[in-house]
Image (spheres, helix red, strand yellow):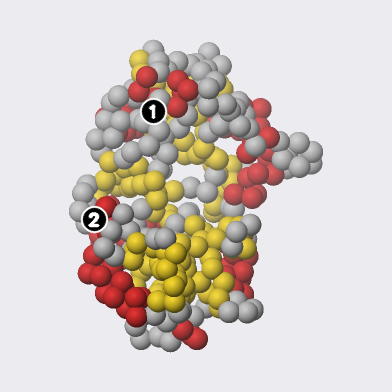
Amino acid sequence: MLAPLSKIVISAKKNKRKNKLEDIKIRLYDPIKPMMAESATIKEIAGKRHALEYKFDGIRVQIHVGKEIKIFSRNLREITHYLPEIVGEAKEIEKNVILDGEVIAFSLHPLPFQELMKKFRVRNRIDIPTKLFVFDILYRKNKSLLDLEYRERWKLLKDVAPQYIPPHIEAVNEREIKEFFQKAIKDGHEGIVAKDLKSKYRLHGGWYKIKKSYSLDMTIIAAEWGHGRRHRWLSDYWLAVKGMKGFHMVGKTFKGLADKEFEEMTEELLKWKIKEEGRVVFVKPSIVVEVEFNDIQKSKKYGYALRFARISRIRWDKEVDEINTIEDVARVYEILRRR
């Protein structure tokens, strides 16, 4: 049984001020919600200079270093007593600072997140070796740093805790980003995080996570008319694989295609229209698409559901009977759970 680390729910009312980082006065031992990264692809961030760092498969920590050291989870729960080895390492850091980072399970190489969770059991807790990385600084010498641009915070962080910072480069072109991403995967990590050099420390906006993706061939069983500039196109696609009987839906996506492809797809899908209900056009499964995704979750609605699905290409060269099956989806799900 795990301690309530992942089950803590903090009321929105109680933490209203902590959800609007720009409105708060940060201080030692009063944790705030961490800045989160949005999912993106390498192509989406290429063309603009970003700082790149490894994305870790661990627990987010906020470390408050003063006369005493306290460690808080992303849910603002104090978890200091679970991580005595990190407390020991934090003693090497200058006093009167608040750092943002991640703790991973590590023994010669990164270990899966599930291994780290053994440290947080209520019973039969296991002492798993860990490693600390810090990637941001929020407070120093009684001063909030939340409104500083990221690049300025990074300079300060290198002075305060150089021994704990992750691999870090700045890059703008797709080749450089891909090379750094591949190095992160080779080193056993989830992917990379790209950070806007001008971003201030806020809940959202300016950080982007790029994770290793998987792909399967699927068909489209229905499509929805888009909104805004996509209103003329069928641009939100219902994705399915082969099931025991017919086709098995595993998710929806509107991501991945260019405008010209939306136009072509709309023209082709309408040829196979079965019926239309509101904004949804149901079609005979006839088009094969290669779908990339970062994860698969169990779903009451679908059985399995893709996370962060996007169409990487339309497979005009493939027939529907060549698409993957629900057994393939289940197999990938099990592989991902063993990571």
Indicate the secondary structure of the residue bearing disc 2.
helix
Give the left or right position of residue 328, taking residue 279 as reference.
right
Which numbered marker is on residue 281? none
Which numbered marker is on residue 229? 2
Give the left or right position of residue 243, taking residue 229 as reference.
right
Indicate the secondary structure of the residue bearing disc 1.
strand
Q: What residue sits 59% from the left and 53% below the top?
A: 112
**Which of the image's four quarters has the C terminus?**
bottom right
In the image, residue 275 sits, relative to residue 72, either above or below, namely below
Percent across and percent down for residue 4 are 68, 35
In the image, residue 123 sits, relative to residue 212, either above or below, namely above
Q: What residue sits 36% from the left and 69% below the top?
A: 312
Given residues 267 and 159, the one toward you in this image is 267
Numbered disc total? 2
Q: CA distance from mark 2 to mark 1?
A: 40 Å
Percent across and percent down for residue 290 are 41, 73
**Amino acid beneath label 2:** Arg
**Amino acid beneath label 1:** Ile
Circle 1 residue: 137
In the image, residue 59 sits, relative to residue 287, either above or below, namely above
Percent across and percent down for residue 185 are 44, 59
Give the left or right position of residue 3, taking residue 232 as reference.
right
The answer to whether residue 184 of the structure is visible from this angle is yes
From the image, state whether disc 2 or disc 1 is nearer to you: 2
